[in-house]
Amino acid sequence: MELTHPLNRTEFGSSDHIGNLMSEEQAMDLLRDWVKNEKLLFHMQQVGHLLKKYAESKGLPSQEVHLWHLSGLLHDADWDQWPDEHCKKIIAELEARNQDPRLIKAIASHGPRYFGVDPDSELDKMLYAFDELSGFVHAYSLMRPHGYDGMEIKGVKKRLKDKSFAAQVSRDDISDASQRAAVPVEDLIQFVIDHQLRE
């Protein structure tokens, strides 16, 4: 496995900062400053929204829901301007802001074969699971005459088998994330169809 952006560390943030979370408004201010690509910004909003809805579906308290939401919102914050420092830059920024280590760890582990950090918590695993799949389902919606309306799992799975469609999306990552989260790919797809932010 080739690590393209290895973080070469396993500890992130400080346990002293558990519960320290910026507001959604502060997160969006950071994103507006760092991210000029509107499609990338929308992707992060989509993943953040999926994580928020998933946390709500698990009955997590509001502070935890906010943690999940922020993890999705910020996971690719440095990709637009600093692709060679992907993950390192946003991690350094969040550590400098004394943010909750669970937020930082989730972001650090959202691409284990790129960063070399395994997703451990349920949050880590679900960010990894929704990241690629969210983008894939969105790409599929754009080619359908009615977008998400009437979209079915079988249609998404058919496109997943077509390696030429949305070729930049790693099918291996989707499969690996599903296994690590112990959630069937079909269930993940249905959740994305039901809860994805639409343009």
Image (cartoon, rainbow, N blue to C red):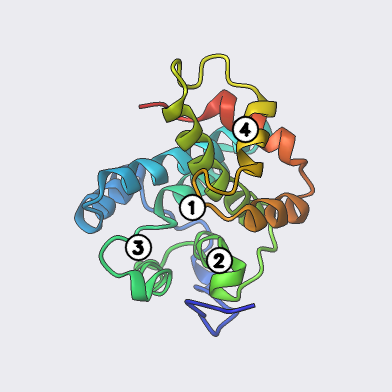
Q: Secondary structure at mark 2?
A: helix
Q: Mark 2: which amino acid?
A: Lys
Q: Which badge, 2 or 4, comes first in the chain's sequence? A: 2
Q: Amino acid at mark 1?
A: Ser
Q: Could you tell me if residue 56 is visible in this image?
A: no
User: At numbered mark 3, what does the secondary structure look like: helix, strand or loop?
Assistant: loop
Mark 2 neighbour class, 10 Å CA radius: few under 14, some 14 to 19, many 20 or more: many
Image marks 2 and 4: residues in contact by CB distance under 8 Å:
no
Which quadrant would the N terminus be assigned to in this image? bottom right
3 or 2: mark nearer the eye:
3
Q: Is residue 65 above or below residue 4?
A: above
Q: Position of residue 107 (x, y in %)?
A: 50, 62
Q: Position of residue 121 (x, y in %)?
A: 69, 58
Q: Residue at x 49, y 77 (%)?
A: 4
How far apart, in angstroms, are the residues tagged by discs 3 and 4? 26 Å
What residue lies at 35% left-to-right and 27% top-to-bottom?
199
Q: Which mark is residue 156?
A: 4
Kind of residue at disc 4: Val
Q: Earlier in the sequence, mark 3 or mark 4?
A: 3
Q: CA distance from mark 3 to mark 1?
A: 15 Å
Do labels 4 and 1 touch, CB within 8 Å? Answer: no
State left or right for residue 183 relative to residue 105. Answer: right
Within 10 Å of disc 3 (Cα), the crowding (few <14, some 14-19, many 20+) is: some
Q: Earlier in the sequence, mark 3 or mark 2?
A: 3
Residue indicated by mark 1: 71
Label 3 – label 2 distance at C-alpha: 17 Å
| Residues marked 3 and 4 touching at CB (< 8 Å) | no
Q: Secondary structure at mark 4?
A: helix
Q: Which residue is denoted by mark 2 in the rendering?
A: 105
